[in-house]
Amino acid sequence: MKREALIVALDVEDLQAVRRIVRRLSPSVQFYKVGLRLFTREGPRVVRWLKRKGLKVFLDLKFHDIPNTVSQAVESACRLGVDFMTVHALGGEEMMKGAVESARRASKKWKKSPPKIFAVTILTSQNDLLPLGIAGSVKNGVLRLARLARKAGVNGLVCSPEEVKELKKRYRKAFRFITPGIRLNSQNRDDQKRTATPEQALSRGADYLVVGRPILNASRPREVAENILKGRA
């Protein structure tokens, strides 16, 4: 497994905690995810700090709004130099297409490499769409959103380990796949519903694994990360 295929989720409170984690995981981990909790607390400075360290950043804010608002948010993220970012596929084709076009324009404007836009399908904490007013299975919902994402021209999809095999079969040439919901053998699922081990997710076609608590909560986090990278987890 390539080192950049492991993305560690920085689901922590502040930049001080980030510094501790990066120090403990260096040089094993080169790619980190900044999500809602951390970005709401620290804002752009946490992204800038990671980039100054020469690390890759996956900005996972799941933009979901009217197309113009999302396009503007994507432009701001491009200015920070993030490598990956997410939009929510439920925002629709027009919104996703606007995000892709905005990333292309902004990368030229700020003279930075264009980030990869990943569309989030159905969250791994959900296994029943009926309460949301969406008919059909989670799998069918994911496939419908994947078709929209392909038409919009995004670079990849975020999906659970349960759907990635079917999606890889259909969209191998169109997308890269990020798989969250990774749990190690014998670990509980916490609030995740659709999970898999690293080996299972990779064998089904995942290109990147997002791993948070299994690494962050470990007594020896770097050892856990190395085990995942070497296929021993």
Image (cartoon, helix red, strand yellow):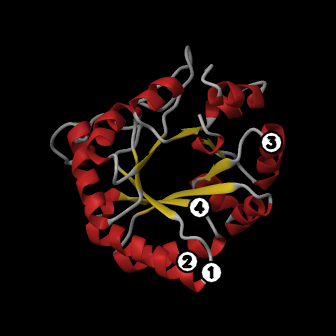
| Quarter occupied by the C terminus | top right
When the figure is inspected, residue 97 is found, relative to residue 41, above or below; the finding is below
Q: Which residue is mark 1?
A: 111
Image point 49% across, 62% down: which residue?
116
Image point 82% across, 51% down: which residue?
16
Question: Which of the 4 image quarters holds residue 136?
Answer: top left
Q: Which residue is mark 2?
A: 107
Q: CA distance from mark 2 to mark 4?
A: 11 Å
Report helix, strand or loop for mark 3: loop
Q: Which residue is mark 4?
A: 83
Q: CA distance from mark 4 to mark 1?
A: 14 Å
Find the residue positioned furthest to the top: 186
When the figure is inspected, residue 117 is found, relative to residue 203, above or below; the finding is below
Q: Amino acid at mark 1?
A: Lys
First reached walking from the N terminus: tag 2 or tag 4: 4
Q: Amino acid at mark 3?
A: Ser
First reached walking from the N terminus: tag 3 or tag 4: 3
Report helix, strand or loop for mark 4: loop
Image point 48% across, 82% down: which residue?
105
Report helix, strand or loop for mark 1: loop
- Position of 26 compared to 56: left or right? right
Label 1 Cα crowd, 10 Å radius (few <14 / some 14-19 / many 20+): few
Q: Position of residue 101 (x, y in %)?
A: 40, 76
